Amino acid sequence: MSAQKIPTKIVIRPFRLDDLEAVMAIEPSAFGEHHWSRQSFVSELNKPEGVYFVACEGSHNKLIGYSGFWIIGDEGHITTLAVHPDYRGQYVGERLLVNNITEAKICGANWLTLEVRASNEPAQNLYSKYGFKTVNIRPHYYQDNFEDALILWSENITTEGFDTLFKNRIAELKRKEEEFADFSRS
Ligand SMILES: CC(C)(COP(=O)(O)OP(=O)(O)OC[C@H]1O[C@@H](n2cnc3c(N)ncnc32)[C@H](O)[C@@H]1OP(=O)(O)O)[C@@H](O)C(=O)NCCC(=O)NCCS
């Protein structure tokens, strides 16, 4: 992707019930007709194992993305990750993933996992930047088009090897943020 995008200052904070209206405005464009309902989100936010965040565009405090995971033992199960279509390609999704990894480690996770549609190349590329690999396939898993689900797993996120990769990726993200800032000033 080109770095010359509209700059955005992103704030990531915990997901609150009063974020639901803005989240439900994004959800169908991200996941189609089988998207989560408002009630599903309420139930997720009430689960003790659920850890959810939103990304807001700093200057307007506009909610433009969200993500979260369940903590099950030493595993973090990423349940959702979505960015408003107008704000894709600006590293909002990546910042939400970085936040998930950081928070999952704080919660005691050693591993992260998720399911993704076989056709979802943007998401697969994003996770692969952080070392996630396909370890299994659930054939015809999605009921709308019987598409396969890929089951991705991270490597052990507490290892030195992962830490090096993670720090390098964060440094790259910071460089891109600076490029965005320069672009907005020019
Ligand atoms: C997947 C999604 C969250 C990515 O968010 P985003 O903010 O647009 O992505 P980012 O700008 O952070 O991109 C980070 C990396 O993801 C990959 N990526 C993102 N968009 C991509 C695209 N259109 N094509 C290919 N790779 C893409 C790239 O590897 C990119 O890094 P790079 O530019 O350095 O190569 C977003 O496309 C989305 O909301 N999709 C609909 C919901 C969804 O599919 N969620 C994932 C469910 S598992």
Image: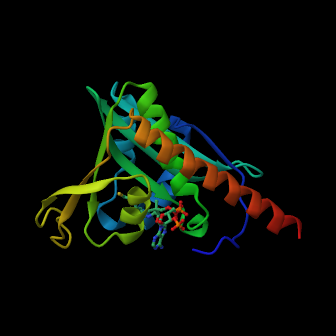
Q: Is residue 43 above or below residue 98?
A: above
The residue drawn where x is 46% and y is 26% is 106
Work out which quarter of the rendered image holds the N terminus and state it.
bottom right
| Residue occupying image coordinates x 52% and y 37% | 15
Residue that extends furthest to the right in the rendered view of this protein: 186
The spot of residue 181 in percent (x, y) is: 80, 60
Which of the 4 image quadrants contains residue 50? top left
The count of marks equals: 0
Image spot of residue 51 (x, y percent) = 42, 33
Residue at image x 25%, y 25%? 73
Quarter of the image for residue 69 reads: top left
Residue at figure coordinates x 39%, y 63% from the top left: 123
Q: Nearer the viewer, residue 117 or 162?
A: 162
Q: Residue 83 placed where, x, y %? A: 51, 59
Answer left or right for 149 relative to 183: left
Viewer-closest of 158 and 120: 158
Asked if one can make out residue 22 in the rendered structure from this viewpoint, the answer is: no
Q: Is residue 86 visible?
A: yes
The C terminus, quarter of image? bottom right
Q: Quick check: 147 left or right of 52?
A: left
Above or below, comparing residue 35 to residue 162 in the picture: below
